[in-house]
Amino acid sequence: INVFRCAWSSAERLDGKTVVITGANTGIGKETAIDLAKRGAKVIMACRDAERGQAAVKEVVEGSGNQNIVFMKLDLADSKSIREFAEAVNKDEPKLDILINNAGVMVCPYGKTADGFEMQFGVNHLGHFLLTYLLLDLIKKSAPARIITVSSLAHSWGSMKLDDLNSEKKYDKNAAYSQSKLANVLFSHSLAKRLEGTGVTTYSLHPGVVKTDLWRHLNGPQQVLMKMASPFTKNSSQGAQTSIYCAVEPSLEKESGGYYSDCAPAKCSSEGKDDVVAQKLWELSCQLLSITWE
């Protein structure tokens, strides 16, 4: 038996609903796409790589029997690409019921996005922050609607370096990853407050320790540790369960801003609930992206 298997399951249907999933061509994102497609949703798979994206669409169609699956190009490391993607969705889609901010990079060597942000903070937080901002009117129009952001337990080892969000003074790839995952929790928390009364609810989550492509940047000893832990790690399908739970579980309709793990409410770190840090991060994110989002 797998001790971590989600006991949760649901026959909830999503016919007539539209879902956007970032990073849907691999790992948890792809498994989430297959599940929501089986429930009848139209799934927009937002991925950086067209070839891999198209191949994943084929897999999702075959795995779900749902033809209503499309690939759209989205590079979260480039605000121009994010704006083009959002513009296309806003133009072509009459509604957007569920946005799943799933894509991520993990403990990668130091690099910068097209806009000059540190890669992990830039993709994992700022990219999704901007994407959500640009799609928000459409999401509100579709209420009741949900915005789900995939974080990680690693958020609890992170702290927001508010004076150096882009790790320009010092780069530690693990600290930068944890910071970006803490930013996901804080963003979801702040967003919930701003969306009170709109019928749009937000969720952040820890998917479990999942063996996916994200592991490619781990060093030797980290790889060994992960191999030793592998009886306790989930496959991508198990790792996707909490994302799916946050997307479809009816009892969550009135919940917003919370953090989830193993298909249940969970405790995030104390900094993950810190309103002062959350507000500061919000303001700095708006400044970095040159947007006004009260």
Image (cartoon, rainbow, N blue to C red):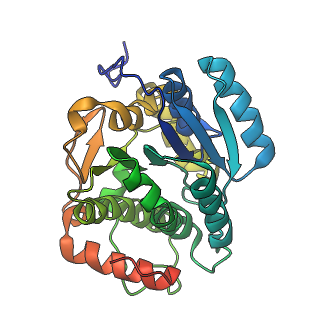
**Vertical arrangement, residue 274 with respect to residue 106, above or below:** below
Q: Is residue 151 visible?
A: no
Q: Residue at x 40, y 59 (%)?
A: 181
Locate residue 41 relative to residue 68 in the image: left or right. Answer: left
The image position of residue 80, as x and y in percent, is 67, 71
**Vertical arrangement, residue 19 with respect to residue 8, above or below:** below
Locate residue 277 relative to residue 216 in the image: left or right. Answer: left
The image position of residue 271, as x and y in percent, is 23, 66
Viewer-closest of 231 and 65: 65
Count the numbered circles shown: 0
**Vertical arrangement, residue 207 with respect to residue 5, above or below:** below
Q: Is residue 102 visible?
A: yes
The image position of residue 119, as x and y in percent, is 59, 69
Locate residue 59 relative to residue 197 in the image: left or right. Answer: right
**Vertical arrangement, residue 149 with respect to residue 114, above or below:** above
Q: Residue at x 27, y 76 (%)?
A: 279
Q: Quadrant of the N terminus?
A: top left
The image position of residue 286, as x and y in percent, is 43, 80
Q: Quadrant of the C terminus?
A: bottom left
Q: Which residue is drawn at 67% across and 60% down?
A: 75
Q: Which residue is drawn at 29% across and 30% down?
A: 249
Outermost residue on the top side: it is 1
